[in-house]
Every structure is written in structure tokens, then in C-alpha cells.
Image (cartoon, helix red, strand yellow):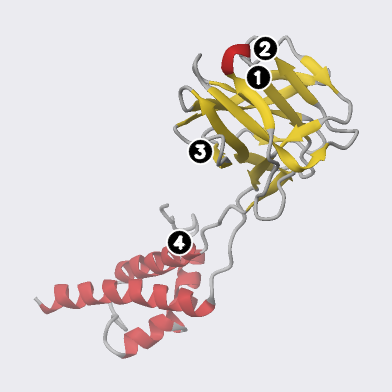
Amino acid sequence: MRLRAPRSPALFTRIQATFLRSGPLQVLAGYGYLPSRGSKAMKRRIFVWAISAMLICSVGQATAGVIYSNLGPGESFGAVGYVIGGGFKEVVAAQFIPAITGESFSDALVALGLRSGTNDVLVSLETDSGGLPSVILESIDLVGAMSTFSSPSVVTATSVLHPALVAGTPYWLVVSAAVADSDAAWFLKSTGVTTPSSHLAFNDTGSLTGPWIDVVDSVPIPAFEVDGAAAVTPSVPEPAGLALFGIGAVAMIGCRWRRKHAA
């Protein structure tokens, strides 16, 4: 980022003069690291560098959070699950509804185990249309990520596209076989059945877009978690760290000036 001087030279001079008369710059000048008198252009460059250093210290950070989760304590889940792929080409979809607007899809944690065949499944995020999965927002290929069926684990599918999610809007997490011979299982949440508002959908065509069989009764639902990343928020730098960063940057400039004028 390049910091430019204000359009008004008089305004810039006033800001610069105030900055140079106080704080770390005045201390450095007293020790001979900065010119107490000299080129206005040199002082202006020092001022811009110091302000730039402070701006660097205040870079924002994204905050992540759980959008939806039915995993038990310690990411626990049940002992049985739905078949994914296999001879039936089974595709399973579970619905979730974000509670917070302004979040983007960050990752999904899915309880999976490989029954046989190639260790490769797709985890997809899809929109909802009429209570069924519709448009694919992103598909994440999990190659070699699953443990065996006898010792399943929670696998993380990390988003690359980070599609935005809207609070109160239904979405679907869909798990399917990525290759024809992949035979896996999506394990159920540990408490067994769903609440009446939960939806589950299946198809046995291997297609991510249906046609779907809708299940709205209280049936077992697979275990998963959806995480999101909030919008970037500015962080407040610690005063001590900010001062040290600024002093260090300005001192380096001062040393360069001294070497140049001593030659």
C-alpha cells in the first residue's frame, strides 16, 4: 500500500510538523538518528514511512465460527451410517440453515469411513429449491482422506471458493462417490434421530443434482459440521508493539540518512 500526501501542501506540512515535534521521532532526532534540521523532503519521506508502518500494524483478521453442527462432544458420532456410492451409487444430502448473515463457507467436517474400493468422495455445498438440493455452489474432492469403516473419523473438506451464506436460507451438504468403485459410509450423529424440521434427501443415480427422494420424517441424520468465516474486521494493535515497529522503521531510515551525509 502506498501512502500519498494530502492534496493540500499546507495541510500536509501542519500534520508533518505536529508529528515530528512529538513522540518517537523527536527522541530519535535527539540521539542523532534523524536530522533535527535539514531537508524538508527528507522529513516528509520519514513521516510517510512512519505512518505506513503504523497502517501495516492494523491489518484486519477474519474470524471463523461454527454455522451448524450436530457432532457430539469431542467431534463424536454414531456407530452406523448411510452407504455412499457402492453398487447402489448412493448419494446422501443433509440440510442445514445458517443463523448468521455475512458468513462465507469455510469448511465442512464429515464423519466418514471407507468400506471398500477407491478412497475418494465428493463433499458438495448446494442451494435449496423446493426443499431439495439444487445448484452446486462448490464440490470438494477428498482423495485418500478417509479412515477405514472399522475406525471412521471426522474428515475436513476445506473450501476454496468460499461462497457466501445467507441467514435463514436452507442449504445442503451432499456426499457422493467421486469414482465408480468407491464404497464409503457417512456415519450418523450420535443422538440418532433428527428434529422434525431436519430434511434428508437421497438418490441412487450417483448424480449431485437428483432426481431426489425427499425424507422429512424423524429419521437418522448423518453427522457433520459446517464452519464459516466472517467478514474481515480491523484489529487494534497494542500501543507498545506499534511504537516499537514505528521506531524501528524510522531508525533504519535515519541511519541511512547519516551514512549518506557522512560520506
Residue at image position (76%, 21%) is: 201
Q: Residues within 10 Å of mark 4 (few under 14, many from 20)?
A: some
Marks 3 and 2 close (CB-CB < 8 Å): no
Name the residue carrying label 3: 147
The earlier-in-sequence mark between 3 and 4 is 4
- Residue 238 image position (x, y, % from top left): 54, 75
Name the residue carrying label 4: 56
| Distance Cα–Cα, label 3 vs label 1 | 19 Å
Number of marks = 4
Name the residue carrying label 2: 204
The earlier-in-sequence mark between 1 and 2 is 1
The earlier-in-sequence mark between 4 and 2 is 4
Circle nearer the viewer, 4 or 1: 1
| Distance Cα–Cα, label 3 vs label 2 | 24 Å
- Residue 75 image position (x, y, % from top left): 65, 50
| Distance Cα–Cα, label 4 vs label 2 | 53 Å
Marks 1 and 2 close (CB-CB < 8 Å): yes
